[in-house]
Image (spheres, grey):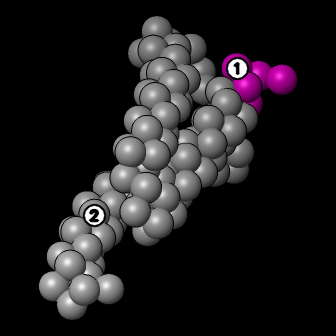
Amino acid sequence: MTNSEVVSFQLISIAGDAMGKLFEAMAASKKCEMAQAHTLVQEGKALLNDAHNAQTSLLVADANGEKTDVNVLLIHAQDTLMNTVLAETFVNEIIGLNDRINQLESKIEKIIGE
């Protein structure tokens, strides 16, 4: 297996795990579990950092003149990482909105006495 194939599988695996953590965080925020949501986001960010480090190894190898085979696997890996990075932005926004909704619902319940 070539270095780019190894790194591609690492990117797919790590970015996939990060996406899972981010989606778990979003689900936790919907259930008013904000501390858990923030913990899961941090775990997702740590995984994304690991994925970026793996990606950087390819960039460094390329900068050092090592030829990197560009194939469908590497393209899929890069796509998976890019989508996870984009999802992180949206998930953080949704968590913020869920937090605001949770706060407003709590205030409404106090007002109407439920």
Q: Is 112 on the left-hand or right-hand side of 20?
A: left
Kind of residue at disc 2: Asp
Residue 11's place in the image compared with 67, above or below, is below
Q: Residue furthest right?
A: 1
> Disc 2 vs disc 1: Cβ atoms closer than 8 Å?
no
Q: Secondary structure at mark 1?
A: helix
Q: For mark 2, what is the residue?
A: 99
Task: Say if residue 78 shows up in the picture.
Answer: no
Main secondary structure found in the magenta portion:
helix
**Depth order, front residue of 36/57:** 36
Report the span colored magenta: 1-6
The amino acid type found where label 1 is placed reads Asn
In this rendering, the label closer to the viewer, 2 or 1: 2
| Quadrant placement of the C terminus | bottom left
> How far apart in space, not on screen, are marks 2 and 1 (Cα)?
43 Å
Using a 10 Å C-alpha cutoff, classify the residue at mark 2 as few (fewer than 14 neighbours), some (14 to 19) or many (20 or more).
Answer: some
Q: Is residue 42 left or right of residue 69?
A: left
Q: Nearer the viewer, residue 9 or 93?
A: 93
Q: Position of residue 65 (x, y in %)?
A: 50, 12
Q: Secondary structure at mark 2?
A: helix
Which quadrant: the N terminus?
Answer: top right
Q: Which mark is residue 3?
A: 1
